[in-house]
Amino acid sequence: DDTSTALAPGLSGSSTMPWSKEKDFREKLSKLSESQQSIQTLSHWVAFHKANAAHAANVWADEAQRAADPHRQLLLVYLANDVMQNSRRKGTPCADAFASQMATVLPAAHAAATPTVRAKLERLLSIWEERAVMPAPQVAEVRAALGGEGPPPASAPAVPPDSQQAAPA
């Protein structure tokens, strides 16, 4: 008799047990604000619970997809950005866990977003690519899901160098 709970799609981990901190994390996500301190505090909480990174990423993705407001979705992506960049620097599993959810979360947020929010989401994707926060194949998968190549990286010129001329003032 197998009574274990199956992991949700995209969720990996050695344990199939429910995550004891899920309710706490959902509450913290609901209280997340746009302040840098709020984002960093919750990012550090996720890092502290790195043994459950896959569970945290799954809960985060669920909340991001439930969010109706594009600005709220952007805020949740900013949280994931902080988690992934800090995790990549420190070598914790959080970066991979959150990155694995981006092919689902980012296109949904992008589709519902205003042009301003879309540009911010696309910029984050470029940053993740430039800083190797996400592996290149994963970035390509997310870009394809967004429906295009996306903007060129910030380090690349927007027009070919031979066609750049000083604009009239």
Image: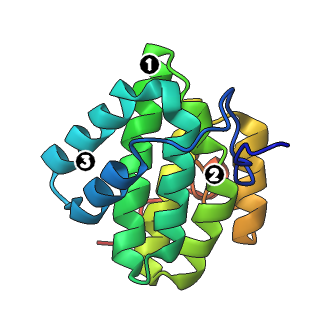
Left or right placement of residue 68 versus residue 17 in this view: left
As drawn, 150 above or below 53: below
The disc, 3 or 2, on the residue closer to the chain's N-terminal end is 3
Look at the image and tell me whether residue 129 can be seen. Answer: no
Q: Decide: is 147 above or below 10.
A: below
Q: Is residue 4 visible?
A: yes
Across and down, in percent, residue 159 comes to 61, 58
- Residue on which disc 2 sits: 101
The residue type indicated by label 3 comes to Ile
Which part of the image, by quadrant, shows the N terminus?
Answer: top right
Q: CA distance from mark 2 to mark 1?
A: 19 Å
Taking the image as shown, residue 91 lies to the left or right of residue 144, namely left
**Marks 1,3: beta carbons within 8 A:** no
Between residue 34 and residue 130, name the one nearer to us.
34
Tell me where residue 77 appears, x and y as whole percent.
44, 57
Asked whether 66 or 136 is in front, the reply is 66
Crowding at mark 3 (Cα within 10 Å: few <14, some 14-19, many 20+): many
